[in-house]
Image (cartoon, helix red, strand yellow):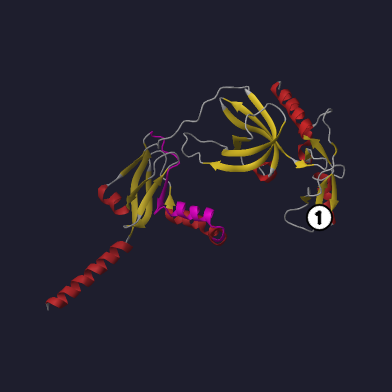
Amino acid sequence: MSKLFYKIFLISIIFISTFYKSQIVTVRGVVKDSLNINNFISISVNDTINKFRDKVFKDETFKNKNWNKYDELVKKFSTFPDYPDGNYNITAKLTDTLYFHKRDYITQKYKVADIINKNIKVILKPRPCIPYKKCDQKVPSRLYAFVGKKIDVSYVDQSKYCGISLDSEYKAEYEIEQELNEHYPNSKIIFTAYDHNSMYEYDFSNYDNVLLFIEEYCDELVKDHFFPVYKTTDGRWASPIKLRDEHYYNSDKFKPININFEKSVSFDLLTTNSNPSEEQIAQLKQFKFPEKYYKIENGKAIPIAGRYVEDLVELWKEISEKNKTK
């Protein structure tokens, strides 16, 4: 009899435990921030949304198969509190954990059961951060212009800084191959670059060799501008013509000239199609690779004109001076 009672007791415990773990409730509570701004706070069940996003960014195969599920996950496992009073409600299991997020604040997490039983009111606190370096210098103390070969360009995590930057920050290291302005004391140079979602062709890190303009502000070296450059048959450096930018570089003194680039220098007419139609080629000749600057052969655009780096440095100085007077 005692054994039977013991078995019934165990089964009851297991049943109650299983029921408890699977019980779904509506959690109601309050979340605010300590500065009483109370906007842009998000609540997620078991941090599901962040975990999903992290996996998407790390695993391209997973992204392709599952990205269409993102909106459904957001709807099912996250919510936002009412503004400005911070009231929220969300459906979850008693054994789940709620994560409370806000940019630049310390994330907090609590078990659903504890929130209900202890009537927890969440107050998010700002995370410790490093203020951005303040620099009031308007005119650079130095300007380095040189042809550089890329060694490394690395993304800088800005989450440790206070506030929000609209630009991504990069730390770059380059080998100096030809100096064209002030002398830099080392053969390698490290500088900071900022970028705001540039198209591929306007991202300097996508080229092996570039003509770089690096300015010094408050003892920090910062990238100002660049031109992609390639070797010519006489061993010099030059940059082909980018038609969409010619209106900006227009100069009576530094017009494009005929240049013989090395045979290896050519560009795909279309990156998505190795066999463009005659109509596509005609459009490319009109808007991207005009015949006075490029020769079209076998689906490639071969540059036949451009500017040498020496002229580009003087051209950029001329443009910079004009911009100062505007």
**Residue 45 lies in the magenta-colored region:** yes
Left or right: residue 178 versus residue 102 is right
Coordinates of residue 131 in the picture (x, y in percent): 47, 30
Residue lying at the far front in this picture: please name it.
Answer: 186
Coordinates of residue 233 in the picture (x, y in percent): 83, 43
Above or below 262: residue 256: above
Task: Tell me where residue 208 sits by quadrant.
Answer: top right
Residue at image x 38%, y 52%?
90
Above or below 182: residue 127: below
- The residue that mark 1 highlights is 299
Task: Tell me where residue 231 sits by quadrant.
Answer: top right
Residue at image x 47%, y 56%?
73
Q: Nearer the viewer, residue 96 or 54?
A: 54
Q: Nearer the viewer, residue 188 or 74?
A: 188
Type of amino acid under label 1: Gly
Q: Which residues are the magenta region?
A: 35-61
Left or right: residue 105 versus residue 23 is right
Left or right: residue 269 versus residue 291 is left
Task: Tell me where residue 253 sits by quadrant.
Answer: top right
Q: Nearer the viewer, residue 198 or 266?
A: 266
Residue lying at the far top in this picture: please name it.
Answer: 325
Quadrant the N terminus occupies? bottom left
Quadrant the C terminus occupies? top right
Coordinates of residue 264 in the picture (x, y in percent): 78, 49
Q: How many marks?
A: 1
Above or below 22: residue 35: above
Coordinates of residue 282 in the picture (x, y in percent): 85, 50
Residue lying at the far left in this picture: please name it.
Answer: 1
Disc 1 secondary structure class: loop
